Image (spheres, grey):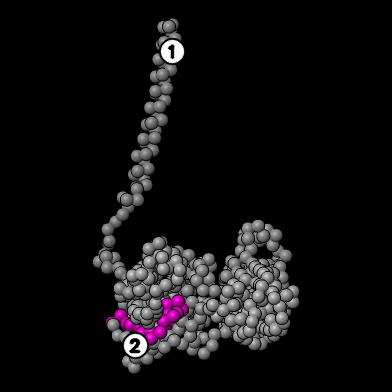
Amino acid sequence: MNPALKKKRRVTTRKRSEGLSGVTGTAFFLFVFFCFAFPAASQTRTPPQSQTAIQLSFAPIVKKAAPAVVNINGKRKVVQRSGGLFDDPFFQRFFGPGFGQRREPQKGPIGSGVIIRPDGLIVTNNHVIAGSDELTVVFADRREFPAEIIMTDKRTDLAVLRIETGDGPLPYLEMADSDTLQVGDLVLAIGNPFGVGQTVTSGIVSALARTTVGVGAFRFFIQTDAAINPGNSGGALVTLDGQLVGVNSAIYTQRGGGSIGIGFAVPTNMVRTVIHAAEGGSLIRPWLGATGQAVTAELAPSFGLSRPSGVVVNAVYPGGPADAAGIRVGDVITAIGGHEVSDLEALRYRVATQMLDTEVDVSVVRKGEKRRLTLALMAPPEDPPRNETEVNGRNPFNGARLANLSPAVGEEYGADSMHPGVIVLEIAKGSPAARIGLQPGDVVLRINDREIELVKQILDELSKPADSWKISIRRDGRVFTSVISW
């Protein structure tokens, strides 16, 4: 190789080496500068600066709130197996999986409750006391008192009880405005999980207005990561000022049934409506007189919305509150009473938590233009009269209890009352109606090509001699038609 070329290569290599050394030196200087100028997070940690900081605790809140959270015991029939040949698959094959089973009453812890009045008014979950009797309320100090059921409401999964102690005013929790909650707020969950005694867990509000939880008809929940386990149902979700902000109701669970950090509570603004009804004797919720569907990302631009939010109205009941307020088909309801409406469940919740015979502002978007309307809230009318009827005779509806569908009946049973029909209220077990697949909540629309609007029309059709009936029903927003041979 040419010596001159060798020397040139050595020079080039040295220059490159010198260039890298310069960059490395600059980087090292910057590294040292930033280490001194911006210390790592671990270097900024400091120990508690006072005795008070060391003693920070939830204890004062628990001391205030815990006495108002009680355990609820009840007698409930539990399936018991007889064992022996009754468990033999051979016999179960012929007599069914329930062969040899018997239901025996057992008494024990079934859930939790919260005292919300000093006179002994208690709120819990409807699913806690459902199917139970001989209810007993047990205090943290082990005192026990029999409880009377004042009201149950399946649609909110709430129940109201009352106890008489004769010991003067009882400890109770005041109810906070659940709409003041924010994601990140600290909360405590107090209850009696697994029947082991009163426990307290802490966490934060991890979400608001959860509407996809299948508990009750009004799916609008506070989500928290405070541990809520089986038995916590009906217990208290408490703010750091010791006020009740929710009633613990449901959890997402793994196979074992324990908490995985996702729990749900009924907001106190919904609880307050049920308590008000219990004290007044009847539960009548305000009626909107309109229905619709959530605005999706695909629909939002066509309604002049920058993001998917609100409910687009697709039906308005003539003469109802929405009609009187000027709400029209095609309007997008975006807020009620200043609270955003994100979907149909949120709309139902906002209407249900208002008081009857009051007015509330409704924000709508019509053809891209924002409008504010005034909605006068009223009770749903029972028109036509319900005319509850038990169907008998040789026909497929034998064993069904029917009623004329009206706005009042629709609100009571959670059915769409925007169109006429006859609703199935109850089905007798093992009846012909049960065998053909009718279910409570079904709305009968047609029989043998005759449109059905009244119970009387069904009875007329069933009284005619026939070997088969063509029946159309509406279930969960879908229409099903079948021919029943008889």
Q: Are discs 2 and 1 less than 8 Å apart at CB?
A: no
- Where residue 88 appears, as percent x and y from the top left, is 38, 66
Q: Secondary structure at mark 2?
A: strand
- Provide residue 249's location: percent of width, then percent of height: 44, 72
Q: Is residue 240 above or below residue 303?
A: below
**194 or 247, which is in the foreground?**
194
The amino acid at mark 2 is: Phe
Q: Give the residue furthest to the top.
A: 2
* Furthest residue in direction bottom, as rendered: 166
Which residues lie in the magenta part? 120-141
Image spot of residue 331 (x, y percent): 69, 69
Disc 2 marks which residue?
145
Q: Is residue 137 left or right of residue 441?
A: left
Q: Which residue is mark 1?
A: 8
Query: Where is residue 129, by image quadrant?
Result: bottom left
Q: Residue at x 48, y 74 (%)?
A: 267
- Is the residue marked by circle 1 packed among few (<14), some (14-19), or many (20+) residues within 10 Å? few
> Residue 135 magenta-drawn?
yes
Q: Amino acid at mark 1?
A: Lys
Residue displayed at 37% across by 81% down: 105
Residue 351 in sight here: no
Q: Earlier in the sequence, mark 2 or mark 1?
A: 1
Q: Quadrant of the N terminus?
A: top left
Tag in front: 2 or 1? 2
Quarter occupied by the C terminus: bottom right
Query: Can you tell which quarter of the image residue 248 is in?
Result: bottom left
Residue closer to the observer: 141 or 353: 141
